Amino acid sequence: MKERPVLFFAIILSIIVEVILMVLVYDKIGGERLPVQIGRFLFQLVCVFLILTNKSNTALFLLAAYHIVSGLFGLYSSESTEPLGQIFIAYHFIIGLIIYFHDWIESKIGIKNVG
């Protein structure tokens, strides 16, 4: 991950935010949504594991798509008008795009020389 610092930062941020989201949802709603939250978290962990060990582009695409689709679903949720809901929608779109375009971002800021 030393050669992909933007991707590493995005993945770490993604995991931290997902854990925070799980705690907030559990505090607000209770345990009824916990199985869904744990499933989402495990999906992300599997993708991250594949990205880190195999440098899997498919897992990278799935993780980026997960965030973008989560942002789209968030647009149509009942909490999308609340400030925290809007923050999480923006977060999912931004982090999904950062994960997908990490090579381009790294080359533009001079961290990595891409092709």
Image (spheres, rainbow, N blue to C red):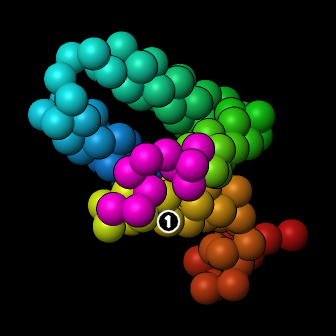
**Res 98 seen here:** yes
Bounds of the magenta segment: 73-82
> x, y (%) of residue 64?
65, 47
Residue closer to the observer: 111 or 71:
71
Residue 48 lies, in percent from the top left, at 52, 35
Vertical side of 45 occupied by 18: above or below: below
Chief secondary structure of the magenta span? helix
65 vs 107, nearest the viewer: 65
The structure residue drawn at horizontal position 63% and vertical position 50%, both measured from the top left corner, is 72
Dividing the picture into quarters, in which one does residue 3 lie? bottom right
Q: Residue at x 17, y 36 (%)?
A: 28
x and y, in percent, of residue 80 in the image? 44, 56
Q: Residue at x 33, y 49 (%)?
A: 17
Front one among 87 and 15: 87
Residue 66 placement, left or right of 83? right
- Residue 62 vertical placement versus 114 (above, below): above
Q: Report if residue 81 lies within the magenta region.
A: yes
Horizontal and vertical percent position of residue 40: 47, 26
Q: Mark 1 is on which residue type? A: Ala
Magenta-drawn stretch contains 25: no
The quadrant of the picture occupied by the C terminus is bottom right
In this picture, is 5 found above or below 107? above
User: Residue at left 70%, top 56%?
Assistant: 100
Disc 1 target residue = 90
Can I make out residue 88 in this image? no
7 and 115: which is toward the camera = 7
The residue furthest right is: 115
Circle 1: is it few (<14), some (14-19), or many (20+) Cα within 10 Å? some
